[in-house]
Amino acid sequence: MTATMKGVVFPGDKKVEVRDFPVPVPGQGEVLIKMKASAICRSDMSLYYGNAGVVGSADKAGAVIPGHEPAGVVESVGDGVKNIRQGDRVAVYLALGCGECPSCKSGYIMFCPTWQCVGFDQHGGDADYIVVPEVNCMKLPDGIDFVTAAVSTDAVGTLYHAQKRLGISGCDTLVIFGLGPMGGAGILVAKALGATVIAVDMIEERLELAMELGADHVLDGREGNVVERIRQLTGGKGADAAVDCSGNTHAENQALDCIRPHGRAAFVGECRESTIKPSEQLIRKQVTLIGSWYFPIQEFAEITDFIVRKSIPVEKLVTHKFPLSEAETAFRMFDERKTEKAVFVWE
């Protein structure tokens, strides 16, 4: 008799179903993981609405189990698995690649020409079990619980990598625009690096959470001239660096406007189209602007070591935890922005 498990699917138009699926069997080079935590991400909403957006294909809506931020315990391994064993605690890297191209070999698997995404192109972690290639398993150190691990596979990891590329340190005043889970993770990372943090959003609850996460100043984007207030807070010089996590073109422009000459900025929030002023905002200030998306797989060990060493309270980013049976409620509340980071958990 085939063993079954529960898994979430999105038939479309904000419908959520928890269905029975066969427990997958790991094949050559694959690992079966029993889920312990799987975080909800804003990009999941494209499938929730019925059309894959940032990644994946529209025809996957209703056909694939979502969840690209999973963590759990290895249940069994397939033939040829060498470095992962039953009982290992692991998180899952979301990008599946060919394994042979320069991008895969460099660890930036999401740049593989044939890459696919866990939870969009292949079944993800919003289920009792998931099968992934051994190479996508990232071992967890002692001191990292499963919820922290799940959140760190995206929000914390992405913002760590972005700030590493910007060279953020205790010498810097960093402005973070957009204080959802990504922006909140950015605050935690920046404070652990020693930076002074100015946090900007237009939602009162997010501004309050930003203070709890350690932001030195919070600015309500609905009140006054944000760029001028940042200049005042920095003695007229402007910020050393800025990160936009909102994907809003107005915030992107504010990020470029608020930094000083030779400042640095990163765009992390997804935005399909924007308008900036290269001469004024980049060229004549000699600004460095980067786009930053995810992190190379080998950096996860560095990220988790950083979390443990700096005692970063990643759990503060999580406002709600749900059992898988309450998936409809979880996604509805997340869609209505009644939660920030929400995570499915298993006992």
Image (cartoon, helix red, strand yellow):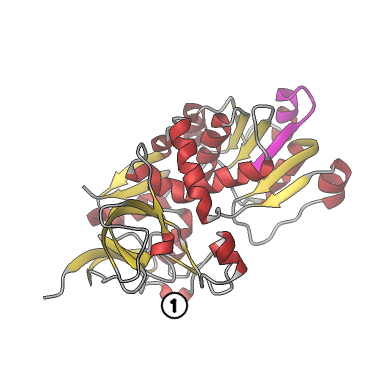
Q: Residue 320 in the image: state x and y as whole percent.
A: 34, 42
Residue 243, position in %: x, y? 64, 42
Q: Which residue is mark 1?
A: 59
Q: Residue at x 51, y 53 (%)?
A: 298
- Please give the range of residues in magenta: 230-245
Q: Nearer the viewer, residue 213 or 89?
A: 89
Pick the residue in front: 332 or 230. Answer: 230
Q: Is residue 112 left or right of residue 25?
A: right
Q: Quadrant of residue 110?
A: bottom right
- Where residue 186 appears, x then y in whole percent? 55, 39
Is any part of residue 312 visible from this angle? no
Helix, strand or loop status at disc 1: helix
Along the horizontal axis of the image, is 91 left or right of 219? left
Q: Is residue 289 magenta?
A: no
Q: Answer with left or right where residue 159 lies relative to residue 240.
A: left
Question: In the rendered image, which quarter is residue 34 located in?
Answer: bottom left
Is residue 237 on the magenta stretch?
yes
- Badge 1: residue crowd in 10 Å (few <14, some 14–19, many ≥20): few
Identify which residue is drawn at 54% across, 74% down: 114
Q: Give me the residue at 49% from left, 74% from top.
A: 57
Q: Is residue 27 visible?
A: yes
- Position of residue 290 relative to residue 114, above or below, is above
- Amino acid type for the residue under numbered disc 1: Asp
The residue most toward the top is 235
